[in-house]
Image: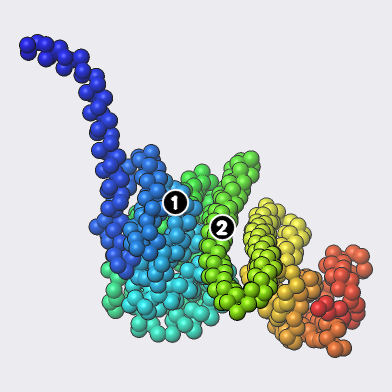
Amino acid sequence: MNDIKLRDFIKRLPETAIFVVILLLCLNLTQAQTSLEDAYIVAPDFTVVPESVPDLKRYSKEDLAEMEAHAKSYSSKLNSDRDRLLRAGAYHSIVAINLELGDRDDALYYLYELLDIPGFKDSKGAIEVYWAIFKWYSYSGNTVGMLEQFSELRRLGPLHNFYDETEPENLNKVYGELIIKAGYYKEAKDFYVNQLLKDSLTLGPTRFAVLNNDLASIYNKFNQPDSVTYYRNKAFKSINSNVKDRFPEEYRNYIRDYIQLHDFWYKKQFTQAHLEFAKLFLSEAAAYDVWETHTSVYAYHYIATHFFEKGDYNQALEYINQAIKLGLNKVPINTLNDLFILKGRLLDALGQRDETELVIKQFNRIRDSLAASLRNVDLTRFEVDKIRDGQSRAEKSAIENENKFILAFSTAIFTIAICAISIVSLVVIGRSRKRLRLAKVDISDKLVEREMLLKELNHRVKNNLSLIISLIKFQSEEFEDPRYIEKLNNLEHRISAIAIAHEQFVYADQQIEGSFYDLEDYLNKISNALISISARTINYQQWVERIKVTIDTALPMGIIINELLSNSIEHAETVGVLDVELRIESKNEWIIMMYSDSGNNFEDKPKGESLGGFIIQSMVEQLNGKLVRYGSSYHIKLKHKV
C-alpha cells in the first residue's frame, strides 16, 4: 500500500514542482508590489517619511522596470482628491526608480506631476520637489527653469519655517550663483557686494569665506587683480578665524582647501607641492561627493591643467577624462564646455586631430541631448496642460449649457414662440462660440509651438556662437606671427559683438522680432569687453539718450562701435579719451552717432584697403545713413527704424 502511494507521488512530482514554482513567483511578485505600495509613505504635509524609503540598488533593472509599471498602474487607479497622499507616495516611487534607471526625463515629468496634486504646491513637501527640479535644470544650464523653481522656493520658505535650506541667506547665495552661471558678472558683483556681504555676522565664517571667494572669481572675469587679491584674502581671513559657526570643523577645513586650490590656479602655481595638495584634496572631496561634486571636478581640472602646463599630455588627458566622467549630468553645461575644450587641446597636442573632432562632436551630442530633454519635457507639460484646459472648458461649457437650458425653459412658460426663438438663438450662438473657441485654441497652439521653436533656435545660435569664439581662441594659440594673431582677435571681437546682441536682445528674454531695446547697456558690454583686454590706459566716455531700437538697428550699430573702438585701441600709440555720443534728431527720424579719438596716430588707410572701414561703411549703408570723417572723429547719421 505504501509502495503504491510512493509511486503515485513520484508520478505527480513534476506537476507539484511546477505548482510550487508558480506559487513562489506569485508570492514574490505580490511581495514586491505590496512593498512598493507601502514604500514612500507620505506625511500629511506631503513630506516623505525617511524610514519608508527602500534601497533600490539591490534590485535588477528588470525588477525596477516591473516595479515602475506597477506603480504607474497603481497610481492611475487612485482618486485625485481622496487618495492624494497615496498618489504622492506612488509618484515619489516612480521618480526614484527612473533616477536609478538613468531616465531623468521621466523622473522630471513625475516631479511636475507631484506638483499638480491638489494642495501639494503650497505644502512643505513641495520644497524638496522644487529643489530637485532646480538641480535638474542647473545641470542642463536652463537659467529660465532655475529661476521658476527659485521663485517658488523663496515663496514657500517663510511659510514652512525656512525648511530644507530655504532660509534667506542660503537662497540669496543660490541666486548669486545663478546669475554668475547666466554670465551676468556685473549684476552678480553688485548683488554680492550690496546684498550678500552687507551683514557678515549673520553668515558665519565658512559661508562668508565662500562668498568672498566667489566675488574674487567674479573680479577675475573683469581682469582686476587687486580686487581678486583683496576678496581672496578676506576669504582666508574669515575661514581661518576663531569664530565658530554651524558647520563642523572637517567641512570647514575642506572649504579652506577648496579656496586655497582656487588661489593656486589663479596665481598659476603648478609645482610638485601644489600637485600633491590637489591630489590630497581629491581624497577629501570623496566624502562630500553627493553634495560637492563640482569641487572634485574642479580638482581634476586643476591637476589636468598642471600636467598640460608641464607638457605631460597623457597624464593630463587621464585626469580630464576623470573630470568629464564625474561631471556628466552633475555639473552645469558651461563647466563641461571648459572640460571638453581642454581635452580637445590635449588631443591636438598629442597629434590626434581625428580624436579632437570626435570630442567636439561628443560635447555637441551632450549639449543637444540636454536641449532635447528640455524640449521633450516642455512638450509633455504642454500636452498635459492642454488636456486639463480641455477638461476645464468642457466643465465650464456644461454649466453654461445647463444655465441656458433653465433660462430657456422658464421663458417657455410664458410663450412658445419666444421659447422657439430663444432655442434657435442659443443654437446659433453656441455654434459661433464653438467656432471662435476652436479658432482661439488653434491660434494659441501655433503661438506656443512658435515660441518653443524660437527658444530652441536661440539656444542653438547662442551655443554655436560660443563654440565659434572658443575655436577661434584655440586656433590663435597655434600662431606665433602677431599679424595672424591680430586678425583672429579682430574676428573674435566682431563675432562677440554679434553674440552680445543675441545674448542681450534675443536669447536672454526669448524676445521675438519687432521688440524694442535700450542701446546703452549693449554698447557698454561691447566697450567693456574690448577695453578689459587692452594693455593701454583708456578713458572711455559714453553718453547715450534713451533710444528704443529694434534688433535690426541695434546689431549694425554695435558692429560700428566695435570697429571704431578696435581701431582706436589697436593702432593708436597713446590713447587719451574715447568719446561716444548717441542722440535722436529731427522728430525721432534720425540717430546721430558722434565718435572721437583724442589719440595722435589714428589708423587711416585708403578707401577699400581697410576691412574695418569697409564693415563700417556697409553697416551705415544698411541703415540708410551717411558718414563723415574728420581725422580721428566720425559723424554718422543713421535712419531710425520704428
* Residue located 30% across and 61% down the image: 42
Q: Nearer the viewer, residue 196 or 97?
A: 97
Image coordinates for residue 10, horizontal then vertical, percent: 18, 15
Q: Residue furthest right?
A: 607
Left or right: 171, with 596 as reference point: left
Q: Residue furthest left?
A: 1
Image coordinates for residue 208, horizontal then vertical, percent: 39, 77
Q: Nearer the viewer, residue 89 or 622?
A: 89
**According to the image, label 2 marks what residue?**
383
* Residue located 35% across and 84% down the image: 201
Residue 539 lies, with reference to residue 135, above or below; the image says below
Residue 98 lies, with reference to residue 113, above or below; the image says above
Q: Quadrant of residue 375?
A: bottom right
**According to the image, label 1 marks what residue?**
326
* Residue neighbourhood size for the residue with mark 2, other residues' Cα within 10 Å, grouped as few (<14), some (14–19), many (≥20): few
Number of the front mark, 2 or 1: 2
SS at mark 2 in the image: helix
Left or right: 471, with 266 as reference point: right
